[in-house]
Image (cartoon, rainbow, N blue to C red):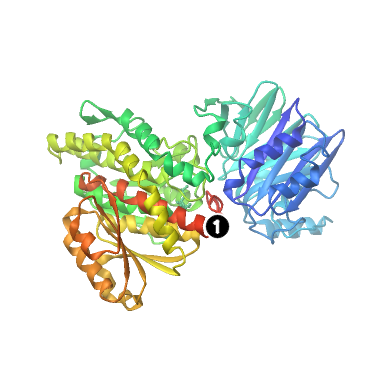
């Protein structure tokens, strides 16, 4: 997805914009550009390729002087990556410049209307239509122009808009695409995400949909689409810019894998009190649960894989039926929802378009929505009835690790809280689970200590063309995540399969040397998965197993064993996943892949 930045202050804007765009590179992009007001005109510099191309073009911004400007990294949706299609886009007169994240769904008819009015277009983008619309509506009042703009645009957008008539300020607005205002001293900014702001301020304002913000160096003003002014809300960000830096690691992904013990500690320990679970911003009561006929868990990608774990865990502790859905499927399958439905939406970014749409569908049909989110103030966090934050800190790498892990333990905490409310778990078992949760960070540390062994086997196995991950019950859910991690950063084809399902077809693909990861940590089914391991081994598979320390049975049937500590059954996925994260990372590293920004991927998919 695209990235937007904007600046008004005493500094030269161009270098600030370029640094802000650096902090958005993790979102994935194929071109970049900036626009700065110089006197009574707008100067633009943009180019296809990585940010370095733009830095070279502008001599790190020195060639584009001025104190008010906007910038953009583009993840192409309409029109191929090119200099012409890169943002910012200028109106025909050159008096207005626009940067945009999102998709304008009615841009074709707007373009035809503007062409009939004599406007010409040079790019294939939907965004250029916005620049011409600003010019078309402008009668001297930019706020009025922005209101007209919002009345005709359909789709998702966060916009930065420059007017050469107003050199001291710029305008911004959002609908369904995130946009955050940085509230500085003698300078104010906008960005698609907080890391771009932290070099200037830790006070931010999360814009609501269809709020128009006017940014000047000494003042920020917010208006609604009636032209009424609204208060500027301020939120303090409690992590600093270093948290969004690599900190000496080669890749953000490895840093975030290694940060998991701390992230788990921050997410779990404030919620364990006196042998019980204390959840903040949570208003679900025993009566509400007793009146709940179904729980839907809805998410995408790795967050969906957490949902698959959640189904097993929640049904085990509450005996309430749980269905897990991929968000993009959920909203189009006429789900059966009513006031007795609880919907749990899981999202690291809180901005995934498919998950937002599914959540809104559920709410519209009467479901109560509980969100598990990592990004403070994100759309999903703001629209849910209850929010449980993962406190993983900023996750920059496209491939999620610490956010996934903290989502797992939040699901565990939620399931234990529900069991506590419903009385469906004996007190001593609940206390045992709380103690085991408190021990998880140290146990994850132990698994990470084994990373060199995993690095060695990755160096031996990175040339495989197809890798299978099999498991049963919770191990099957983790197998899905292990397979996705490998695919998205090493580009090796992989599939996750329920161990008992292989013999119903896929086992025909197993041949001499096929690499099969067997996850055998879910204790109640170790015997069963061991049999599946023997089935594939009998057909020539090369078997790498993940098993609990000391499991001699799996060692006897495996070529390689990655051992993990044992914990209580429902918490085991938090440990089983760690070797798979490391294996994917080391394989991708061995192959020289672009680990933090894999090809074609974005950190948060804010388009359908
Ligand atoms: C996970 O490594 C991927 N980056 C992707 O599957 C991600 O989990 C998915 O896009 C959902 O993102 P969200 O958690 O921000 O909603």
| Disc 1 secondary structure class | loop
| Relative depth, front residue between 550 and 5 | 550
Q: Quadrant of residue 190?
A: top right
Residue in the picture at 68% in, 56% down: 107
Q: Is residue 401 above or below residue 483?
A: above
Q: Is residue 603 visible?
A: yes
Residue in the picture at 57% in, 36% down: 195
Q: Is residue 283 left or right of residue 97?
A: left
Give the residue pinned by disc 1.
Answer: 593
* Residue 22 placement (x, y as % from top left): 64, 42
Q: Is residue 573 above or below residue 23?
A: below
| Relative depth, front residue between 302 and 593 | 593
Residue in the picture at 70% in, 59% down: 81
Residue in the picture at 31% in, 56% down: 477
* Residue 31 placement (x, y as % from top left): 69, 52
Q: Is residue 488 left or right of residue 105?
A: left
Q: Residues within 10 Å of mark 1 (few under 14, many from 20)?
A: some
| Relative depth, front residue between 360 and 417 | 417
Q: Is residue 304 left or right of residue 176?
A: left
* Residue 111 placement (x, y as % from top left): 74, 57
Q: Is residue 387 visible?
A: no
Q: Is residue 430 left or right of residue 7?
A: left
Please count the marks in the image.
Answer: 1
């Amino acid at each position: 997805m695209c990235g937007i930045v904007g600046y008004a202050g005493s500094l030269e804007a161009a270098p600030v914009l370029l640094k802000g765009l650096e902090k958005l590179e993790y979102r994935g992009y194929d071109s970049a550009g900036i626009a700065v007001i110089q006197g009574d005109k707008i100067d633009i510099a943009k180019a296809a390729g990585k940010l370095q191309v733009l830095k070279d073009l502008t001599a790190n911004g020195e060639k584009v002087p001025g104190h008010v400007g906007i910038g953009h990294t583009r993840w192409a949706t309409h029109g191929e990556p090119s200099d012409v299609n890169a943002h910012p886009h200028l109106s025909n007169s050159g008096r207005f410049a626009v940067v945009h994240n999102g998709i304008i769904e009615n841009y074709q008819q707007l373009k035809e209307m503007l062409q009939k009015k004599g406007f010409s277009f040079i790019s294939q983008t939907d965004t250029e239509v916005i620049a011409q619309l600003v010019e078309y509506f402008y009668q001297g009042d930019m706020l009025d122009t922005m209101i007209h703009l919002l009345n005709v645009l359909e789709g998702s957008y966060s916009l930065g808009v420059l007017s050469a008539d107003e050199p001291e300020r710029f305008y911004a607005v959002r609908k369904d695409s995130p946009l955050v205002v940085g509230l500085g001293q003698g300078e104010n900014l906008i960005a698609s995400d907080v890391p771009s702001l932290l070099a200037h301020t830790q006070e931010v304002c999360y814009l609501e949909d269809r709020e128009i913000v006017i940014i000047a160096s000494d003042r920020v003003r917010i208006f609604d689409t009636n032209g009424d002014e609204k208060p500027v809300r301020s939120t303090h960000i409690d992590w600093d810019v270093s948290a969004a830096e690599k900190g000496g690691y080669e890749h953000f992904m490895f840093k975030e894998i290694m940060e998991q013990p701390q992230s788990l500690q921050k997410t779990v320990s404030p919620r364990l009190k006196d042998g019980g679970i204390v959840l903040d911003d949570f208003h679900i009561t025993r009566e509400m649960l007793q009146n709940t006929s179904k729980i839907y868990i809805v998410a995408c990608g790795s967050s969906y894989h957490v949902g698959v774990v959640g189904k097993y865990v929640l049904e085990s502790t509450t005996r309430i039926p749980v269905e897990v859905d991929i968000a993009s499927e959920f909203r189009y399958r006429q789900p059966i929802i009513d006031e007795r439905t609880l919907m749990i939406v899981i999202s690291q970014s809180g901005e995934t378009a498919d998950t937002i749409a599914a959540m809104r569908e559920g709410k519209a049909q009467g479901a109560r929505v509980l969100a598990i989110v990592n990004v403070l103030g994100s759309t999903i966090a703001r629209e849910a009835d209850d929010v449980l934050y993962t406190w993983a800190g900023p996750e920059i790498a496209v491939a999620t690790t610490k956010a996934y892990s903290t989502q797992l333990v939040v699901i565990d905490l939620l399931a234990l809280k529900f069991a506590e409310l419903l009385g469906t778990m004996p007190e001593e078992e609940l206390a045992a689970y709380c103690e085991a949760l408190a021990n998880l960070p140290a146990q994850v540390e132990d698994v990470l200590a084994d990373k060199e062994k995993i690095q060695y086997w990755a160096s031996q196995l990175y040339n495989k063309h197809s890798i299978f991950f099999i498991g049963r019950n919770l191990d099957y859910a983790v197998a899905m995540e292990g397979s996705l991690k490998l695919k998205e950063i090493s580009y090796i084809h992989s599939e996750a399969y329920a161990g008992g399902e292989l013999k119903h077809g896929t086992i025909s693909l197993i041949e001499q040397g096929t690499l099969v990861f067997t996850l055998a940590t879910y204790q109640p089914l170790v015997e069963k998965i061991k049999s599946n391991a023997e089935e594939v081994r009998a057909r020539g598979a090369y078997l790498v197993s993940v098993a609990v320390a000391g499991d001699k049975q799996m060692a006897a049937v495996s070529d390689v064993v990655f051992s993990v500590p044992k914990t209580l059954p429902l918490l085991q996925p938090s440990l089983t996943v760690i070797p798979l994260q490391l294996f994917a990372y080391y394989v991708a590293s061995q192959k020289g892949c672009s680990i933090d920004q894999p090809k074609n991927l974005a950190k948060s998919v804010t388009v359908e």
